[in-house]
Every structure is written in C-alpha cells, then in structure tokens.
Image (cartoon, helix red, strand yellow):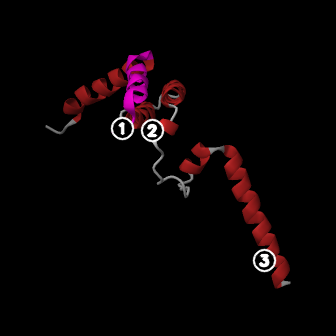
Amino acid sequence: LFRRSARLLLVAALAFLSLRALQGPRAAEDAGATTALAGLHVPARLHNFSKVASNALKEAEKLMDEFSVLEAEAVLSKALHKCEGSHSGPRGAAAAAKLREAPIFSKVSGYGTLYDSSRSSLMPS
C-alpha cells in the first residue's frame, strides 16, 4: 500500500511539473519557481537582442492593454538592461535604441512621469 501511494504521489508531481512546463516561463515566474539555468551567464554572442526587444515590446503592449503600467515598465527595463549590458556590443545597443524609439516605450514612460509628478500632491501636508 505504501509503494502504491508513493508511486501515485510521484506520478501526480510529475504531471503537475509537466503542466507547468507546458504553460511556459511566465507561469513558472508567477508561481515563484526558479530554474537551474537562471543564474548562468550566457555570452552576448548567443543572445538575439532584436528578439529580446521585440518580445519585450509585445509584452509591454499586452500589459498596457490590461492597464498594468508598472509591469510593462518592468518588462521594458529588464529588456533594456539585457540589451545595454556590459557585454552586449553593437547589436545590443541597436536593440536598445529600437526599444527606446518604440511608441509603447514613450507611452509607458509618460505614465511613469505622470505618476511621479502626482506623488507630491498625495503626500500628507
């Protein structure tokens, strides 16, 4: 009986992890999971910086449609950090310029400026 219970528990755990893997990295991040590869350094020559930028722009657009300004700002800043990293080179700089020139970047930045300017009126007097 113990072996059968242990086997069922193992099968259930594997099924759960398989479903989480199928949902993609966003679901794993939302659940607070970390991957073993997350901390490894990936050389800049292996990064596709234009893809990093375009994915970030698409994600930011989607988040702004949901009125999630802070999350959109976080997505764009992570992409900029990756593209402007110390080992990114000219391809990373070009992708960062693409990010900064995108209309969604100025839209998110505008909301950030608006929120920062309204902060003083919300402070206790």
Q: In which quadrant is the C terminus drawn?
A: top left
Is tag 1's residue or tag 2's residue first in the polypeptide sequence? Answer: 2
From the viewer's perspective, tell me whether residue 93 is left or right of residue 113. right
Q: Considering depth in this image, is 51 or 78 the residue closer to the camera?
A: 51
Where residue 99 sits, quadrant-wise, is top left
Is tag 2's residue or tag 3's residue first in the polypeptide sequence? Answer: 3
Q: Which residue is mark 3?
A: 6
The nearer-to-camera label among 2 and 3 is 2
Instruction: Give the label on residue 9, or none.
Output: none
Disc 2 vs disc 3: Cβ atoms closer than 8 Å? Answer: no
Q: Determine if the magenta segment contains residue 20.
A: no
Q: Which residue is mark 2?
A: 44
Is tag 1's residue or tag 3's residue first in the polypeptide sequence? Answer: 3
Q: Which residue is mark 1?
A: 85
Q: In which quadrant is the N terminus drawn?
A: bottom right
Main secondary structure found in the magenta portion:
helix
Q: Amino acid at mark 1?
A: Gly
